[in-house]
Image (tube, rainbow, N blue to C red):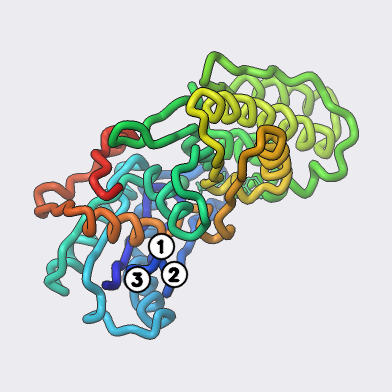
């Protein structure tokens, strides 16, 4: 069976094609890069509308398949930006109708976890999902993926991107700050906001911008933001692993590509005799392959949808999905 997945919750529109064994036959994408300011939902949606058909063609090409070889169309149903979600849902409906194959809407956060289980040896991990818009600690319990901790305000990637943007750096800021952080030497005191199992980052953003105005170097600030933000994430992740008695930690989301985050979580895991899993970078960021794979798993688990079930949900929660395929 071949599943084609369309991702388009935010800045990236991506098409992935996978088979039953979670072989990634194609995973192509295009990201909006605003010249100035943040991502405008309508502009991102227009970008996705322009790119989605050429990307579908490209994915089929890369996979060495014909469109008629596609047996299932899956798409990111939420959470995300409304106009972007509606654009990819429309594309998915049209493709499913044209090919006369089933369609399934996939929860984006669940897909980040499922692709990690698909391509690594992780079986039942705690997932630290760290991206632009989302930051959650997720694990499977009694038929659902449950959120054990999350950000109370902005995603950790958004913290990095916003700080970089205010400092005049292009989007996405995370990878640029990672490089700058390597040259940082002095840890400046940024607020460490962990509330129970939850984290908050907007206070850190304000404090870092104030330090910047006072002349602290970008290197020291990038270093300090990473040290403090990633320590907060490592703390709540460790607490989830301890309470759940779970010896596996899986990273997902664009920020999971960060080597310093991997080092800190990896160290914590090693200290408690646990194992860390990190999918390849192209499967960490928003991508179509994770949507295709999750759709395929859902289909195998008996999930079916009519067109009426494909309405998008901007606030689609991770724990709303009945996980029938595990
Ligand atoms: P996603 O929303 O999952 O596609 O991830 C995009 C986010 O990941 C953006 O906020 C990026 O700044 C961030 N990101 C990508 N690579 C890195 C990196 N190496 N270090 C930190 N953040 C990163
Ligand atoms: Mg994501």
Observer able to see residue 22? yes
Q: Residue at x 30, y 47 (%)?
A: 326
Alpha-carbon distance for marks 3 and 2? 7 Å
Picture coordinates of residue 56, whole percent (x, y): 34, 72
Farthest residue, direction right: 185
The residue that disc 2 covers is 24
User: How many marks overall?
Assistant: 3
Observer able to see residue 90? no
Helix, strand or loop under label 3: strand
Mark 1 in CB contact with mark 2 (< 8 angstroms) = yes
The residue that disc 1 covers is 289
- Other-residue count near label 1 (Cα within 10 Å), few / some / many at <14 / 14–19 / ≥20: many
Left or right? Give the position of 85 relative to 187.
Answer: left
Q: Is residue 217 above or below residue 9?
A: above
Residue 209 quadrant: top right
The residue that disc 3 covers is 19
Picture coordinates of residue 9, whole percent (x, y): 38, 48
Q: Is residue 23 above or below residue 49?
A: below
Left or right? Give the position of 234 relative to 241.
Answer: right
Of the numbered discs 1 and 2, the one sitting upstream in the chain is: 2
Q: Residue at x 25, y 74 (%)?
A: 70
Closer to the camera, 158 or 195?
A: 195
Of the numbered discs 3 and 2, the one sitting upstream in the chain is: 3
Q: Is mark 1 within 8 Å of ligand 2?
A: no
Helix, strand or loop under label 1: helix
Closer to the camera, 31 or 241?
A: 241
Picture coordinates of residue 12, whole percent (x, y): 45, 55
Q: Residue at x 61, y 30 (%)?
A: 233
Quadrant holding the N terminus = bottom left
Q: Is residue 108 above or below residue 300?
A: above
């Amino acid at each position: 069976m071949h599943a084609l997945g369309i991702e388009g919750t935010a800045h990236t529109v991506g098409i992935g094609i996978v088979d039953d064994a979670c072989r990634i036959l194609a995973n192509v994408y295009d990201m909006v890069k605003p010249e100035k300011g943040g991502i405008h939902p309508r502009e991102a949606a227009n970008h996705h509308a322009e790119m989605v058909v050429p990307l579908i063609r490209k994915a089929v090409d890369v996979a060495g398949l014909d469109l008629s070889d596609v047996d299932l169309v899956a798409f990111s149903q939420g959470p995300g930006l409304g106009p972007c979600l509606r654009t990819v849902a429309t594309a998915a409906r049209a493709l499913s109708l044209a090919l006369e194959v089933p369609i399934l809407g996939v929860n984006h956060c669940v897909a980040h976890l499922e692709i990690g289980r698909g391509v690594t040896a992780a079986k039942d991990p705690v997932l630290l999902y760290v991206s632009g818009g989302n930051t959650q600690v997720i694990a499977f319990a009694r038929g659902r993926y449950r959120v054990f901790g999350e950000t109370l305000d902005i995603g950790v990637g958004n913290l990095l991107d916003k700080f970089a943007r205010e400092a005049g750096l292009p989007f996405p800021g995370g990878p640029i700050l990672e490089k700058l952080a390597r040259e940082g030497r002095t840890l400046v005191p940024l607020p460490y906001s962990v509330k129970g199992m939850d984290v908050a980052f907007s206070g850190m953003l304000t404090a870092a911008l104030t330090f910047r105005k006072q002349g602290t170097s970008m290197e020291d600030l990038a270093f300090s933001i990473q040290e403090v933000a990633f320590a907060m994430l490592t703390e709540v992740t460790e607490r989830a692993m301890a309470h759940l008695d779970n010896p596996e930690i899986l990273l997902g989301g664009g920020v999971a590509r960060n080597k310093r985050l991997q080092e800190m979580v990896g160290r914590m895991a090693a200290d408690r005799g646990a194992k860390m899993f990190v999918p390849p970078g192209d499967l960490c960021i928003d991508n179509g392959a994770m949507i295709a794979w999750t759709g395929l798993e859902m289909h195998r688990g008996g999930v079916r949808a009519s067109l009426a079930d494909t309405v998008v949900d901007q606030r689609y929660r991770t724990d709303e999905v009945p996980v029938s395929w595990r």
